[in-house]
Amino acid sequence: MAHHPIITLTTDFGSNDHFVGVVKGVILDIVPEAQIVDICHSVQAYDVLDGALTVSQAYSYFPSRTVHMVIVDPGVGTARRPILASTEKYHFVAPDNGVLSLVYAREQRMHVRHITADHYFLQPVSKTFHARDIFAPVAAYLAKEVDALKFGEEVQEYVRFSAPKPKVVDGTRLRGVVLKVDRFGNLITNLTPQDAPALFGAGATGFKIVVGSREITEIRNAYAEGAPGEVIGILGSMGFLEIAANRGAAAQLTGAGKGTDVTVILGEAAAAGKGA
């Protein structure tokens, strides 16, 4: 059976312009047999953290040898470097602005190269569309199994950041933040079962989650377990606490959004109704 290389696309390009189509055209001109998979083109514009979250949740579900192209690039045309990052299973092509940070955090071994082999690029290279002229052709040649060594020298210093971590306020309070709001209005927080095990044990009680205008006292196993208009907590597929509502937008019901504080209050402080 013929091998059909896979290239995925994660961008903030949206669907109103020609950008995504052109990138696909460049790839298919070089490797016509490629299967191109759209992970997401609705990353928040210029939001490198949102791009990092998106690709980190998706990349490992693809077959070995997949090439992941990740373009959230507010620094296009500046001195920021184009990079190629490789694990034992995958290649990633992206700007060196931290958009691969959460992939770096998940992978034990990663080799990062500064892409300098400009004979692989489309010429002339635009100052505003490196996705077309640099990243798409590099991704295509990688899919054709051109050796990663040929694209540039390995670098040790590359841009990376850590996602915001929950903070312990005191013995009864933990403060997190909303990382993103999904299309259903669910609030994806940065709180995990490791951060707040008291929320996720069997029959968990004696806690209060304060976000926006609401106080949540129930953790459910499914969105449909919430009553109409009830705002609940749930452990979502991303591994984070979500604030959700059954067939409703928790963001609207709470008045909260990306960057909003989420405070977990435990024990007697929760029962006493003390504020956050």
Image (cartoon, rainbow, N blue to C red):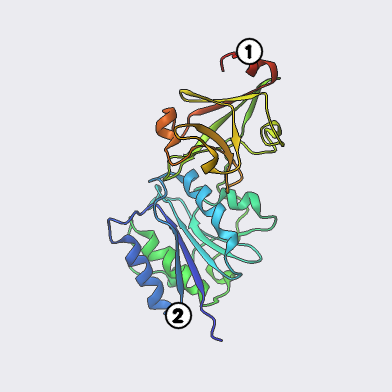
Percent across and percent down for residue 241 are: 58, 38
Type of amino acid at the residue the image marks with label 2? Glu
The quadrant of the image that shows the N terminus is bottom right
Indicate which disc residue 272 carries: 1
Q: Residue at x 44, y 42 (%)?
A: 247
Element type at marker 1?
A: loop
Q: Which quadrant would residue 65 be assigned to in this image? A: bottom right
Percent across and percent down for residue 92 are: 54, 61
Residue located farthest toward the bottom when viewing the structure as drawn = 1
Foreground of the two, 144 or 166 = 166
Left/right placement of residue 156 relative to residue 19 reads right
Element type at marker 2?
A: loop
Q: Residues within 10 Å of mark 1 (few under 14, many from 20)?
A: few
Above-or-below relation of 69 to 263: below
The quadrant of the image that shows the C terminus is top right
Q: Which quadrant would residue 84 be assigned to in this image? A: bottom right
Indicate which disc residue 155 carries: none
Percent across and percent down for residue 154 are: 60, 61
Foreground of the two, 199 or 247 = 247
Residue located farthest toward the left when viewing the structure as drawn = 17
Percent across and percent down for residue 253 are: 42, 30
Q: Tags 2 and 1 in contact by the CB under 8 Å rule?
A: no
Q: Residues within 10 Å of mark 2 (few under 14, many from 20)?
A: some
Foreground of the two, 17 or 72 = 17
Above-or-below relation of 205 to 157: above
- Inspect this view and state whether residue 153 appears: no
- Inspect this view and state whether residue 48 appears: yes
Mark 2 highlights which residue? 33
Q: CA distance from mark 2 to mark 1?
A: 64 Å
Q: Residue at x 59, y 53 (%)?
A: 103
Type of amino acid at the residue the image marks with label 1? Ala
Above-or-below relation of 143 to 197: below
